[in-house]
Image (tube, grey):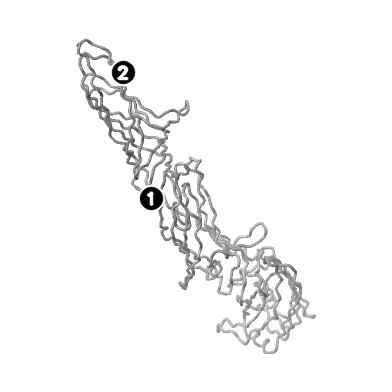
């Protein structure tokens, strides 16, 4: 009768048609095969197999080959933070705001009698616009800054020898958040004669800026008054004052950030993945998706222009030709620096060269570079920024992008071939004749042609010609690539004397499968697609005792 190993090898040739392959018979799952006891007198061995596609794929590349809830099988690859940029590098957040120096001139205060009199109330209130030095980037125009914490460094020189001066400083349109609510941002100090330096805490305060001729201004109201009495004439004097805010921890800045192009430094994504090594030129993916997930907490019209190249192990290169993408804008009413705007940018066959990109395949690396443009539209024109529609950045403002490549096993295969070797059982001494009938029932969306070829492991040579099964027809699929029928049928192999001699002269059999998509429809692979087979054989053989 026929060798168990022979018909088991034929079964495995069909199993391999479900896109599972190996280099060793030890990797096959024989638990799915139940072989009936063979009646050596009748010599009709029969084997049954029921196979679910996922049984043979799940252990192959579990990190990148996944089955989704609907049973569909996907190839997926994710690179988090493929690109990162800290916007502090572009704009800078200073530790100090130098507000400037200013003078207060007091009028003469007469007292010709020489008798002590109360110092009269003087109207010494004035508003000044002070140029501020804030950030190094000259394109930035400040509208508003929220100071989480800092110190007001105030220096006051009182030129009157024997009189203390009271100085009140109020930042116009600026407010401070307290437990009592929102109050004006103001400070009161008493300046003794001579130079006085004050370091006053400033926190949870919002400063308002004006911009003119590329200079930022803060408006400050100053009020000077005196207590006590005088017993002489006080001539006109000049009080000098300087203000700076130091050791600043900003909450946020609202501004016009200007137009900028940020170069994305080339990132290399290592694609040395086993699963991609098995993709040959014969496979053309028809519905792949690459998703770039952007994350930012900046408020500005922005877009990314990526340059993504796929490189295979032969150093061939394919450009993805991905279009530019508008980055979703962070909510300008949100002042939480840890609140990010997430956007998903899908690159597919309708807007890129992704089919050829993955068909390369890029099994060496993918390079990712390009530009991020801020305050520009897709045509490169500057977008409008106003106080009513400002940009906003935080000290931790950044832009990052994740790279995810995902494609269902939905493709067309052209003469895609697989092969493996199977040992012949030692107890089979000699096969005398055989015809093999393979009955099948399946919903696999590929036409499968199976071949066996005797192989001598000692000489490492194939012997004779390939012996082929008639093609097993594929299941029909609809326009979405899903099977629409269950295929039933049979295929027969007739072994000639030459075939028998070649098999008997060798110790192994090479099994090869050629898989083709029939027609124009793409095929969608599901983990729960089933193949049922039954093998009947008319054979005889000499069995060793």
Query: Residue 482's x, y, as percent?
Result: 69, 66
- Gap in angstroms between the C-alphas marked 2 and 1: 50 Å
Residue 426 or 181: which is nearer the viewer? 181
Name the image quarter holding residue 367: bottom left
Question: In which quadrant of the rendered image does the C terminus lie?
Answer: bottom right
User: Label 1: which residue?
Assistant: 90
What number is the disc on residue 121?
2
Question: In which quadrant of the rendered image does the N terminus lie?
Answer: bottom right
Q: Is residue 540 above or below residue 347?
A: below
Query: Residue 128's x, y, as percent?
Result: 33, 33
Q: Which numbered disc flags the more N-terminal residue, 2 or 1?
A: 1
Name the image quarter holding residue 73: bottom right
What number is the disc on residue 5?
none
Query: Residue 228's x, y, as percent?
Result: 28, 15
Q: Is residue 316 above or below residue 165?
A: below
- Left or right position of 456 against 233: right
């Amino acid at each position: 009768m026929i060798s168990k190993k022979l018909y088991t090898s034929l079964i495995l040739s069909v199993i391999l048609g479900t896109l599972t392959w190996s280099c060793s018979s030890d990797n096959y799952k024989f638990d799915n095969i139940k072989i009936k006891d063979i009646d050596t007198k009748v010599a009709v061995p029969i084997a049954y197999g029921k196979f679910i596609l996922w049984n043979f794929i799940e252990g192959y590349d579990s990190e990148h080959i996944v089955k989704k809830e609907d049973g569909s099988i996907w190839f997926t690859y994710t690179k988090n933070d493929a690109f990162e940029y800290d916007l502090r590098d572009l704009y800078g957040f200073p530790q100090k705001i130098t507000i400037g120096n200013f003078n207060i001139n007091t009028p003469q205060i007469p007292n010709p009698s020489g008798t002590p009199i109360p110092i009269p109330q003087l109207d010494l209130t004035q508003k000044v616009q002070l140029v501020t030095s804030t950030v190094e980037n000259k394109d930035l125009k400040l509208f508003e800054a929220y100071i989480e914490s800092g110190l007001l460094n105030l220096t006051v020189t009182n030129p009157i020898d024997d009189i203390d001066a009271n100085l009140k400083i109020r930042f116009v349109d600026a407010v401070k958040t307290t437990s009592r609510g929102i109050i004006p941002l103001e400070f009161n100090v008493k300046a003794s004669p001579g130079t006085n330096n004050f370091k006053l805490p400033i926190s949870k305060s919002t400063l308002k800026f004006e911009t003119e001729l590329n200079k930022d201004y803060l408006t400050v109201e100053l009020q000077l008054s005196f207590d006590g009495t005088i017993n002489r004439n006080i001539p006109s004097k000049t009080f000098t004052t300087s203000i700076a805010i130091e050791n600043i921890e900003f909450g946020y800045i609202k501004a016009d950030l200007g137009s900028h192009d940020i170069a994305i430094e080339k990132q290399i994504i290592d694609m040395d993945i086993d699963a991609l090594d098995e993709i040959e030129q014969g496979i053309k993916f028809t519905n792949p998706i690459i998703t770039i997930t952007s994350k930012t907490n900046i408020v500005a019209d922005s877009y990314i222009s990526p340059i993504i190249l796929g490189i295979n192990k032969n150093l061939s290169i394919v450009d993805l030709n991905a279009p530019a993408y508008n980055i979703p804008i962070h909510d300008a009413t949100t002042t939480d620096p840890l609140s990010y705007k997430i956007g998903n940018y899908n690159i597919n066959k309708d807007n890129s060269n992704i089919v050829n990109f993955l068909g390369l395949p890029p099994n060496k690396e993918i390079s990712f570079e390009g530009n991020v443009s801020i305050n520009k539209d897709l045509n490169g024109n500057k977008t409008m920024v106003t106080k009513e529609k400002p940009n906003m950045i935080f000290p931790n403002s950044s832009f990052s992008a994740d790279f995810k490549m995902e494609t269902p096993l939905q493709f067309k295969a052209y003469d895609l071939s697989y092969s493996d070797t199977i040992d012949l059982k030692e107890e089979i001494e000699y096969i005398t004749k055989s015809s093999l009938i393979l009955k099948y029932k399946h919903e696999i969306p590929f036409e499968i042609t199976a071949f066996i070829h005797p192989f001598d492991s000692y000489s490492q040579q194939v012997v004779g010609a390939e012996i082929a099964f008639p093609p097993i027809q594929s299941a029909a699929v609809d326009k979405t690539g899903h099977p629409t029928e269950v295929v039933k049928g049979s295929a027969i192999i007739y072994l000639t004397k030459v075939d028998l001699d070649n098999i008997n002269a060798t110790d192994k059999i090479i099994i090869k499968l050629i898989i083709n998509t029939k027609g124009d429809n793409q095929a969608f692979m599901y983990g729960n697609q089933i193949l049922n087979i039954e093998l009947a054989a008319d054979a005889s053989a000499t069995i060793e005792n």
